[in-house]
Amino acid sequence: HPTPNHPLKRVMLGLPKEWRRRRQEIFSGYASAQLRAVREEVTQPSIATAFELRRLSEPRGYAAPIMTSAVSSIGVSYLARCIFIARCGHVASSLKNRLVGLAVGPIYFGAMAVASGWYHYGEVLEQVMLPATEDSAMAARLRQVGRPLAPPATLALIEAVEKKF
């Protein structure tokens, strides 16, 4: 029987490898601080290179998780309606049943879009913030903004890169 932190349990639940760290980044305020810094730089470029600007602003980093969340939320809203039909005796075409779907779908979309969107965009951000070869002003700025709010695992990554440069 797998223990709570056993790798087999993560596979059985379908959780990505870095999910715990990404979740901590969302709840610590690190994600929102980083996104604000990126938005400021993308709207009024001052220190980022052309490659960094292109990488941070291209939709590949965030569009797929948001679309998946939107499509999935439609299915979850219909599932909620079906459950209320079966368990609570709702009539399928009633306003009451449609309101149940309307209450469940957007909440699910919001939660999944934030979680999966940050999970994927966080990878893009780390590629810019934690460069493998040479440091840049934008990478240093992102590390500076994120350092005070970074959870321990993310802070360790930031410190490792700073020691390297």
Image (cartoon, rainbow, N blue to C red):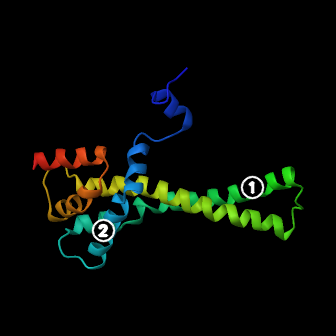
In contact (CB < 8 Å): disc 2 and disc 1: no
Residue at (20% x, 69% y) in the render: 48
How far apart marks 2 and 1 lie (CA) works out to 37 Å
Give the residue number, with chain letter if any, for mark 1.
80
Mark carried by residue 125: none
Q: Nearer the viewer, mark 2 or mark 1?
A: 1
Which residue is drawn at the image coordinates 9% and 50% (left, top)? 165
The answer to whether residue 122 is left or right of residue 10 is: left
Residue with the mark numbered 2: 38
Expressed as whole percent of the image width and height from the top left, the position of residue 27 reads: 42, 55
User: Taking 126 as reference, is 14 above or below it?
Assistant: above
Q: Disc count in the image?
A: 2
Apparent side of residue 13 relative to residue 52 in the rendered image (left or right): right
Residue 11 in the image: x percent, y percent? 51, 33
In percent of the image, x 59 and y 61: which residue is there? Answer: 109
Where does residue 12 sit, x and y in percent of width and height?
55, 32
Amino acid type of the residue tagged 1 in the rendering: Ala
| SS at mark 1 in the image | helix
Q: Quadrant of residue 17?
A: top left
Callout 2: helix, strand or loop?
helix
Task: Single out the residue that lies furthest toward the bottom.
Answer: 44
Q: Amino acid at mark 2?
A: Val
Lower position in the chain sequence, tag 2 or tag 1: 2
In this view, the residue farthest toward the top is: 1
| Picture coordinates of residue 65, whole percent (x, y) | 50, 57
Dot 1 surroundings within 10 Å: few (below 14), some, or many (20 or more)?
some
Q: Residues within 10 Å of mark 2 (few under 14, many from 20)?
A: many
Residue displayed at 52% across by 23% down: 2
Residue 75 lies in quadrant: bottom right
Viewer-side residue, 77 vs 27: 27
In the rendered image, the quadrant that contains the N terminus is top right
